Image (cartoon, rainbow, N blue to C red):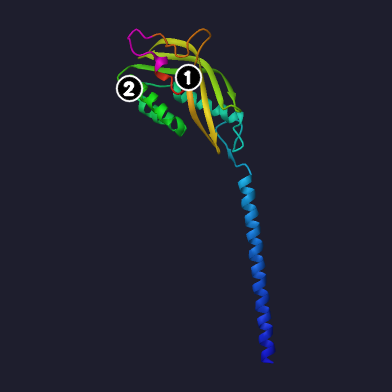
Amino acid sequence: MEIGFSQAQAQRVLRQRNMLVLTSVGLGVVAMFALIAASARDREVVLQPVLTRPIELSSAGVSKDYLELVTRDATVLMLNRTPQNAQYWMDAVLRIVHPSAYGRMKGELLRIVNDQRGSSVAQFYTIESMKVDPEHLTSEVSGVLHTMVGRQEVAALKRTFRFEWTYTGIELRLIGFGAVAAPGAPADADAPAPATATPPATDQHTTGSQP
């Protein structure tokens, strides 16, 4: 009687062990397929900025809306500058630069900061239009670049600037920035110098690769 009972108990334990093994194997297979599916699927992050519409980021590529918003903010950041915020301006610009362009960009920005130190020249830019190309990761903004000496505006020039970007994962970074030449004019043409003989504003802000 005791032998039969022991055998029944052993059989029950064996069945439970086999069920646990099968369950573990099944969960392992499910987890493996879940990992494969997660790695193969494009990642998406849904953002809700202070806008009239939501923006989605995907590793599959950059949306036109997102590129427009980044270009708008980068334009405001790069082309609105005073001697008082020069250090903050440089640090903020470098935070959006791709590592491959970091050294070149930092050198250009340091030159601008050093040129502007002790001056009273400031500039701001009013955007009038924008073109973006998500496929080639470029964007252009057109508008008026205003140059101020103290409180006096000494120049207001229509200028177009080009941004070049790179996109890895879901991260958009700047790799080039420069003024686009007007028809018949060189790309690095300087704005008229103020009467105070301070450095031309256009020469100070052009960074990165020139289109």
Q: Which mark is residue 210?
A: 1
- The residue lying toward the viewer, choosing from 150 and 172, is 172
Q: Which residue is mark 2?
A: 114
Residue visible at 53% across and 9% down in the picture: 183
Secondary structure, mark 1, is loop
Residue 47 placement (x, y as % from top left) = 57, 37
Residue 129 placement (x, y as % from top left) = 56, 18
- The residue lying toward the viewer, choosing from 74 and 50, is 74
**In this rendering, the label closer to the viewer, 2 or 1:** 1
N-term-proximal mark, 2 vs 1: 2
Is 117 a magenta residue?
no
Is 195 a magenta residue?
yes
Contact between labelled residues 1 and 2, with CB atoms less than 8 Å apart:
no
Q: Is residue 196 above or below residue 52?
A: above
Residue 108 placement (x, y as % from top left) = 39, 23
The CA distance from mark 2 to mark 1 is 21 Å
Q: What amino acid does circle 1 point to? A: Gln
Q: Is residue 36 above or below residue 47?
A: below
Say which quadrant the N terminus sits in. bottom right
Point out the stretch of residues depicted in magenta: 193-203
Q: Which mark is residue 62?
A: none
Number of other residues with Cα within 10 Å of mark 1, as a class: few under 14, some 14 to 19, many 20 or more: some
Task: Tell whether 154 sits left or right of 175.
Answer: left
Q: Is residue 42 above or below residue 76?
A: below
